[in-house]
Image (tube, rainbow, N blue to C red):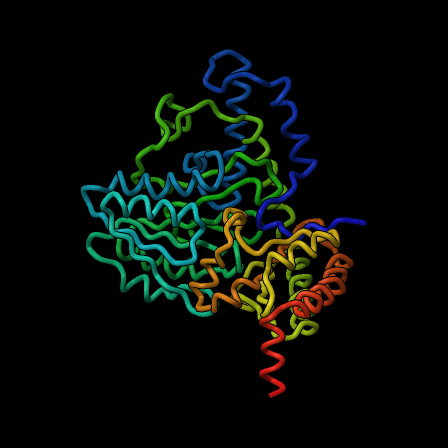
Amino acid sequence: MKRIYLDYAATTPTRSEVVKAMMPYITDVFGNPSGICSYGQEAKRTIEEARIKVADLIGAQNEEIVFTSGGTEANNFALTGVAYASESKGNHIITTSIEHHSVMEVCKFLGRRGLEVTCLSVDKYGMVNPDDVKSAITDKTILISVIHANNEMGAVEPIVEIGQIAKEAGVCFHTDAVQTVGHIPVDVNELKVDLLSMSAHKLYGPKGIGALYIRKGTRLLALMHGGKQERGRRAGTENVAAIVGLGRAVELAREEMSEEVQRLTYLRDKLIQGLLGRIDHTCLNGHSQKRMPNNVNISINFIEGESMLLNLDLNGICASTGSACSSASLEPSHVLLAMGTPPEQAHGSLRLTLGKWTTQDEIERVLDVLPPIVAKLRAMSPLFKGQKMQKEN
């Protein structure tokens, strides 16, 4: 049985071209980039070449890119770095109720240390209202952090409008763009962001490497202390091979993005229409148009998402119910709850995220396999039986 992978929002396979680019820096070019000998200087040149590629992808300057161990570190660096560097200016942070855990948990951490955190609500489509951001700004606000596209239900937030509000108020603006960089056009100047987080393993690069864009002039306190790597902003010997992998991954993404957006949008819509048409008591989570081209998140009433996942996996189809960072939790998605989704409906959520190797045949197979699974699970569901009895009476 051919396996089908539909969890690209959780992680992507590392492309063979990326692995090929990395290999010399695992075996032959092993010098420490801080060294002055030829081995070290060759490694250093390679890092700077990758930095140029990352900067070019998002419209940044080379020196504005700092390599990190991934999206989580980039988000931690952005939020904590600004908070500590701005203690004399203020103590207020604005964020939203649909952020990734690596932003939400940092805000909780900072809140326990005396900072005031305003967590904005979203509408039923998971969209943040820019006017709410504007209303929440005070003379003590030092940072606004709003995710670019939600990792669970795929809504693309109005970052341009929020960026303009932040700019006019003179407040530092961060966005977690882990789900968008390399998948849709991202330009830091158009978005008007001061800080932007990204991660390689979400765009067919290796795990353990990411980057934080830091607009020139943005005050940020370093989290990692030691050597002077990354212009003194992140100490520690650089992961040269992984940085090379990130550089090659963004290079490929830039070349293929336009065509891939069109292809995935077509497959996404085909999957959404097929699921809503073939399974009753089902709804789409998130905005129907302002969403990532590869994201399908639906709620199927009267059954548990985990049961659907297990049955799909038995049929060779890998999916998820939401964020990979909360996969061990039995609690319903905080994102869906923030959108006003009833807990029982949130428990029946299913996230299917498409990627480079997703085919139309695979979409057809999901549409053939999932409805019988739902019917089988509903036949065993007391909730569904109760609904049927209520309808008959």
Residue pictured at 24% horizontal, 47% vertical: 115
Query: In the depicted view, which residue is nearer to us: 1 or 314?
Result: 314
Query: In the depicted view, which residue is nearer to us: 247 or 234?
Result: 234
Q: Which residue, as the protein is rendered here, is positioned at the far top? A: 37
Image location of residue 310, percent across then percent down: 66, 54
Could you tell me how many numbered marks the image carries?
Answer: 0
**Is residue 186 found left or right of 170 in the rendered image?**
right
Residue 40 shows up from this direction: yes
Query: In the depicted view, which residue is nearer to us: 228 or 348?
Result: 348
**Is residue 220 found left or right of 5 in the rendered image?**
left
Image location of residue 52, percent across then percent down: 51, 35
Q: Which residue, as the protein is rendered here, is positioned at the far right? A: 1
Q: For the C terminus, which image quadrant?
A: bottom right
Query: In the depicted view, which residue is nearer to us: 381 or 178?
Result: 381
Q: Is residue 21 above or below residue 37?
A: below
Image location of residue 75, percent across then percent down: 41, 43
Q: Is residue 61 above or below residue 359?
A: above
**Is residue 245 found left or right of 277 in the rendered image?**
left
Residue 260 shows up from this direction: no
**Is residue 386 found left or right of 376 in the rendered image?**
left
Residue pictured at 76% horizontal, 60% vertical: 365
Q: Which residue, as the protein is rendered here, is positioned at the far bottom? A: 393
Residue pictured at 32% horizontal, 65% vertical: 132
Image location of residue 164, percent across then percent down: 35, 58
Q: Quadrant of residue 379?
A: bottom right
